[in-house]
Each structure stands twice: as C-alpha cells, then as structure tokens.
Image (tube, coloured by chain):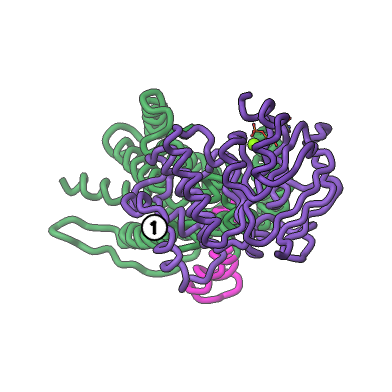
C-alpha cells in the first residue's frame, strides 16, 4: 500500500511535468497547425539557464525561476519569428523539417557552450520529505505536483475566461474570421509560443529538481513523451494535454514499479497506439462537423 | 448623403487567375447596396479585398475618407468596417456569448455588455441559446450569430456575404427581414447575394457582377424591372 501511494504520487508528479510540456505542443499545434519539435529543447535551454543563473552567477533561486521563464518565453517567440513565421504559407512538411532543424540547432548551441559533459542542476529549494500516515512522501514530488496544478488552473482560467485567451481560441479555430473580428493573428501566435515556452521553463525547473543532471540532449526524451501525451489526450485540446500528460506519467511510473523499468517506455507507447486505434482523435480530441 | 466606401478600378488576382477586373462602385451612408452575380463572378473576392483579407494588384479602396492600402484586416475592423463572411464562419467551439464577445474585440470592455444586450434584442433566439456552443446551432441561427457578432463592433458599414446561402425559404425571409430592420435603424450595408430577387427588393441600389466586371447598375427597383436581369438572375 505504501509502495502504491508513493508510486501514485511520483507518477502524478512525472505526469504533471509531461502535462506542462504537452500543453506547449498542443497550444502551438492548435493555433499554428504545426508540430514544434524544437519544444523539448526549450526545456533543455531553460535547465541550462537555471544552472548558469544559480551555480555560475550566484543569483538566488527565485531569480532562476523568474529568469528561466523569461528566457524561455523570449526564446520561443524568437524561434517563431525567425524560423516559423516566414513559413506561414509553406507546406506542412517544410515546417516540420524546419522544426527538426531548430531542435538540432539548439542542441548544438548547447553542446558548443556547455560541452557534452552533463551538469548538475542546482538545488533551488530544500523541500523536506514528510510522513503522512506512515507513508514517506518526497517533498520535491509534492512541490512539483502542487505547482503544476496551480499553473494549469491559471492557464485554464486564462484560456477560457479572459478576452485574450478567448481570442487565442478564436484564432486556433478560424484565422480569417478572427482577423475580421480585429484580432491580430500574428500576435496571437506569438503569445501562444511565449506561453508554451514559459510552461516549458517550469517543466525544466521540475525536471532539474527531479533528475538533476542536464546535457544538451536532455530535452529530447521528455519532449517526445510529452508530444505523445499531447496526441494521447487529443492534439489541440488543452484539457487533453493535461489528462494525457498525467496518464502517461502514471502509466510510466506504475510500469516501472510493478512490471519492469526496461519495459516502461514500450508499455507507454503501446498504450498510445491502442488509444489511437480505438479513438484516432485522442482521448479528448474533438471534431464538430461544419454545418452547411 | 456622404460616401462611406469608394472602390476604384479594383484588380485582384489569385496567383495568375485574374478574378476581379476593374471593379468600381460606391456606397453612401445609410444605403443598402447589393452586389449580385452568379457563382464565381468575384463577389466574395471584392468583399475580402475591401476587408483586407486579400490585397488588390491595382486599384484602391477608400473607406470613410481614408485609403485602406496596406492596412491589415484586423486594423480595418477598428475603423468601423465589419464583414460577415460567406459560410458564416462562427467560432464553432465557442459559445454564442463568446462569439459575440469576439465580435467586440476592438471595443472597450465597458461597452460589451450593452452591445450583447442590443444583439439579443434583435435576435432573441441567440439569447435563448447564449450558453450553447455555436457548432450546435442550426444554420439559420449560425447566420444570426454571424450577423450579431459583426454588429458587436458597431460598424459604420456592414458587409454581408450571401447571408441567405443554404437556408430554407422561411429563414431566408427572416434574414432579409432583419436586413430591412437594420436599414431602417440607419445601418449602412453592402450585401452580396446570388438570390438577386430578394437582394434587389431590400436594396437602394445594386451592381451586377459578371466574371470579375460590373456589367449593370441601377436602383433596386430598376434592376428588378430590367428584362435582361430578369432573364439572367430572376429565373425568367
Ligand atoms: N483561393 C482561390 N484561389 C484561386 N482562385 C480562386 C480562389 N478563390 C476564388 N477563386 C476564383 O476567383 C473567382 C471569383 O471567386 P469568388 O469566390 O469571388 O466568387 P463569388 O462571386 O463569391 O462566387 P460564389 O457566389 O460562388 O460565392 C472564381 O473564378 C474562383 O474560382
Ligand atoms: Mg462568394
């Protein structure tokens, strides 16, 4: 039972990291209809930013949080502006290849600056473990879980209730009609990249706290898993990305604990294939047919 | 009556396809002007060029005394020009009320509530369904929503692209009734239609577009009475 609760919590925590990253994929896909495969590498840049800010510049942990969010958001906007915006009218394949190019570019920049040796992410805060009813609970896990939950609640509120959030949804659905409403489509896309990348920065912090060691390819695996989570939940759907991320993290963690560490990833992707066979649009993917 | 919209010698291309070939016309304040023509005549192309979604190769569009050249579509709305696009294009995943809020994107937040109340007064059906997702509305209701949404920006000129498309006769009548009401309350309207009889009966003036060119113009009554128009557009 103790084992079960610990697995559940770490699964939820891992899942919420995936969910944060998956949100970036899904929001960008929703609005720009493209798969931003460089998204995982934004996490890696965010993690290095945290290392530089705390370990090399000696700034306080709060600065690491604020600055890595700012740096990632700016990076996301810059990537969109330089690499994707010129391709707004280009065929999807060109955009996809560009995204992969951006991904390698970021990895190699990191390789040049930081080398291939892994670096340790600083301890931003000492979160003590605590015991609830005889179960030892890892403090970092709970922190990740709670913070992610807050971020997702705030994001959901923003998207559903604010004028700007609604405008982003409008642009995701129909660009020409949005322009006719007076919404700047370009600005909405830029904002989406900024938000998605800011979420990736939070993911980088939680990733750093959980896994500690960072190298230039660090973003690749969580990136792919989170992309899977986004597809799992229904790409383009925000609650889908949250659900997909959480489920993926749970499946991975439970497989590791109860089945086999080696098989965990195979099981994760197996479940994805199964879901897509049964429901090709993903768990919460939707399609309302247009009325004529 | 002062001129609110003036289109001069407009030429619009899709790649190498010359879709609009030197179209000129004007709309005066308070008028309902209709642009009629068959499928592919270039009606939507003209409207989309006026609203800034498309850009002319040559020619000019002047609205409210200003040349719109080089102004992005989302900024043209701010100047008081609203378009209900062909096929309605409401935001299907958003509620009726959210659609209306998007229509008021350019308006100060303080005026949105009264704007929504005005639209509900004109379209009581929308009020009944204000929490409903637009994708679940009937075609006629979606058209009302698209019109209400455009009115939310309090436009000086409202452009309607085939508002009767795909609607049952009773609904078509209802939509044209609304256009009449809007006209009476002083709204200036540029109406694009294939349904020439209905359009000409509500319009002060009309232009007939054929393969990218204006071939005839006149008052609504004149065009309705013209034998050539009768033959080509009114089924006899
Ligand atoms: N995106 C496009 N690419 C290429 N050609 C186009 C495009 N849109 C329209 N056309 C062409 O331009 C011409 C005018 O089209 P337009 O849509 O303006 O006609 P319309 O009068 O609105 O017709 P309808 O009544 O069917 O809506 C047509 O010959 C059409 O095939
Ligand atoms: Mg048309």
Expressed as whole percent of the image width and height from the top left, the position of residue B198 reads 56, 39
Q: Secondary structure at mark 1?
A: helix
Instruction: Kindly tell me whether residue A275 is visible in this rendering.
Output: yes
- Image position of A231 (left or right of B219): left
* Chain B color in figure: purple
* Chain A color in figure: green
Expressed as whole percent of the image width and height from the top left, the position of residue A57 reads 60, 73
Say which chain tag 1 marks: B
Q: Residues within 10 Å of mark 1 (few under 14, many from 20)?
A: some
Q: Is residue B14 above or below residue A54?
A: above
Foreground pick, A52 / A280: A280
Expressed as whole percent of the image width and height from the top left, the position of residue A168 reads 52, 54
Let me know if residue B167 is in the magenta part: no
Picture residue at 74% right of the left edge, 37% below the top: B209
Instruction: Kindly tell me whether residue A208 is visible in this rendering.
Output: no
Q: Magenta region's main secondary structure?
A: helix
Picture residue at 48% right of the left edge, 73% below the top: A62
**Quadrant of the rendered structure where residue B150 is?**
bottom right
- Image position of A97 (left or right of A24): right
- Image position of A22 (left or right of B61): left
**Quadrant of the rendered structure where residue B65 is?**
bottom right
Foreground pick, B137 / A256: B137
Let me know if residue A50 is in the magenta part: yes
The residue wearing badge 1 is B120
Question: Where on the image, by quarter, is ligand 2?
Answer: top right
The range drawn in magenta is A41-70
Expressed as whole percent of the image width and height from the top left, the position of residue A152 reads 39, 57
- Image position of A218 (left or right of A146): right
């Amino acid at each position: 039972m103790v084992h079960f609760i610990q697995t559940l919590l770490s699964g939820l925590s891992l899942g919420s990291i995936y969910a944060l990253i998956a949100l970036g994929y899904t929001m960008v896909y929703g609005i720009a209809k493209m798969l931003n495969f460089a998204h995982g590498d934004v996490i890696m840049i965010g993690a290095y930013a945290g290392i530089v800010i705390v370990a090399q510049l000696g700034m306080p942990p709060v600065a690491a949080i604020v600055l890595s969010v700012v740096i990632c958001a700016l990076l996301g906007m810059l990537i969109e502006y330089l690499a994707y915006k010129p391709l707004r009218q280009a065929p999807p394949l060109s955009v996809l290849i560009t995204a992969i190019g951006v991904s390698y570019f970021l990895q190699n920049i990191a390789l040049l600056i930081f080398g291939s040796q892994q670096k340790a992410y600083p301890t931003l805060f000492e979160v003590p473990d605590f015991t609830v009813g005889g179960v030892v609970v890892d403090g970092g896990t709970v922190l990740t879980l709670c913070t992610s939950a807050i971020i997702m609640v705030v994001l959901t509120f923003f998207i559903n209730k604010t004028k700007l959030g609604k405008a982003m949804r409008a642009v995701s659905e129909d660009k020409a009609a949005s322009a006719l409403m007076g919404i700047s489509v370009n600005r909405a896309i830029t904002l989406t990249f900024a938000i998605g990348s800011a979420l990736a920065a939070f993911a980088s912090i939680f990733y750093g706290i959980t896994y500690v060691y960072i190298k230039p390819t660090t973003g690749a695996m969580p990136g792919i898993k989170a992309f899977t989570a986004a597809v799992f939940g229904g790409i383009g759907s925000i609650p889908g990305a949250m659900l997909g991320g959480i489920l993926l993290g749970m499946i991975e963690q439970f497989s590791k604990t109860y089945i086999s560490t080696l098989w965990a990833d195979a099981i994760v992707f197996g479940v994805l294939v199964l879901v897509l066979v049964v429901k090709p649009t993903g768990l919460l993917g939707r399609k309302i047919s247009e009325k004529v | 009556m002062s001129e609110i919209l003036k289109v001069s010698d407009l030429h619009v291309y899709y790649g190498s396809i010359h879709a609009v070939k030197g179209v000129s016309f004007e709309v005066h304040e308070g008028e309902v002007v209709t642009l009629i023509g068959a499928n592919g005549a270039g009606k939507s192309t003209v409207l989309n060029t006026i609203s800034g979604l498309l850009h002319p190769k040559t020619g000019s569009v002047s609205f409210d005394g200003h040349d719109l050249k080089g102004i992005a579509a989302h900024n043209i709305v701010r100047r008081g020009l609203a378009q209900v696009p062909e096929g309605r294009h409401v935001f299907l995943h958003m509620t009726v009320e959210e659609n209306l809020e998007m229509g008021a994107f350019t308006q100060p937040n303080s005026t949105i509530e009264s704007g929504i109340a005005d639209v509900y007064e004109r379209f009581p059906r929308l009020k009944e369904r204000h929490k409903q997702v637009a994708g679940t509305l009937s075609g006629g209701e979606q058209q009302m929503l698209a019109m209400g949404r455009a009115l939310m920006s309090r436009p000086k000129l409202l452009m309607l692209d085939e508002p009767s498309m795909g609607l049952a006769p009773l609904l078509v009548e209802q939509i044209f009734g609304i256009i009449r009401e809007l006209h009476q309350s002083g709204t200036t309207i540029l109406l694009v239609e294939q349904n020439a009889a209905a359009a000409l009966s509500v319009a002060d003036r009309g232009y007939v577009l054929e393969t990218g060119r204006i071939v005839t113009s006149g008052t609504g009554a004149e065009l309705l009475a013209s034998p050539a128009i009768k033959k080509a557009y009114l089924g006899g």
